[in-house]
Image (cartoon, rainbow, N blue to C red):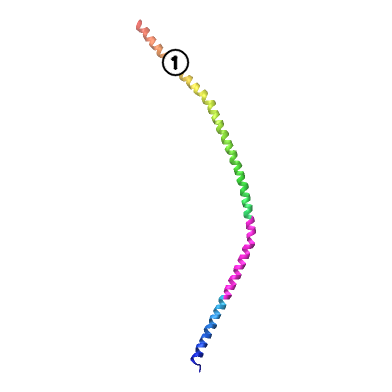
Amino acid sequence: MLTAGEVAALVAAVVWAVLATFMCVALVKLISLINAATKVVSEVGERTPPLLEDVASTVERTNTSLERVEEITANVRSTSEDVSTVTALTRSVVTGPLVKAASLTYGVRRVMGQRRTLALVRGRRRRERR
């Protein structure tokens, strides 16, 4: 028969064997995980340069478009200034004669009104004298 020390040593050896087996399984899984991560990193490394080239060309096209927009904005600004100048000139050219014509019309109406009133007053005086 086995002594107590031998049984304890046997139990300890079995426990260590089971623990070593679990550690080996864990290491195998860890190695496969590291291999998969390495593949993913290498694929990302292969795909990155074309993506960066696409981004660079997109930025270049965007800059070109922005330059065109700046030109268009400058042209619109210039055109709006020209329209504003033409509007002010038209207003001064048209408004001056219109104001003068309105003033003349008002003056003529007032004089005509005064002449009518004066004619009525003279007519009454003549009637009264008779």
The image shows residue 35 at horizontal and vertical percentages of: 61, 70
> Residue 70 falls in which quadrant of the image?
top right
| Identity of the residue drawn at 57% across and 73% down | 30
Q: Nearer the viewer, residue 14 or 90?
A: 14
12 over 101 or under it: above or below: below
Magenta segment? 27-53
Q: Quadrant where the C terminus lies?
A: top left
| Identity of the residue drawn at 60% across and 41% down | 72
Work out which residue is located at the far bottom of the displayed protein and give it: 1
Work out which residue is located at the far front of the displayed protein and give it: 5
The image shows residue 107 at horizontal and vertical percentages of: 46, 18
Q: Nearer the viewer, residue 14 or 32?
A: 14
19 over 82 or under it: above or below: below
Q: Main secondary structure of the magenta part?
A: helix
Label 1 residue SS: helix
| Identity of the residue drawn at 58% across and 36% down | 79
The image shows residue 55 at horizontal and vertical percentages of: 62, 54
> Residue 34 falls in which quadrant of the image?
bottom right
Q: Nearer the viewer, residue 19 or 110?
A: 19
Residue placed under numbered mark 1 in the picture: 111
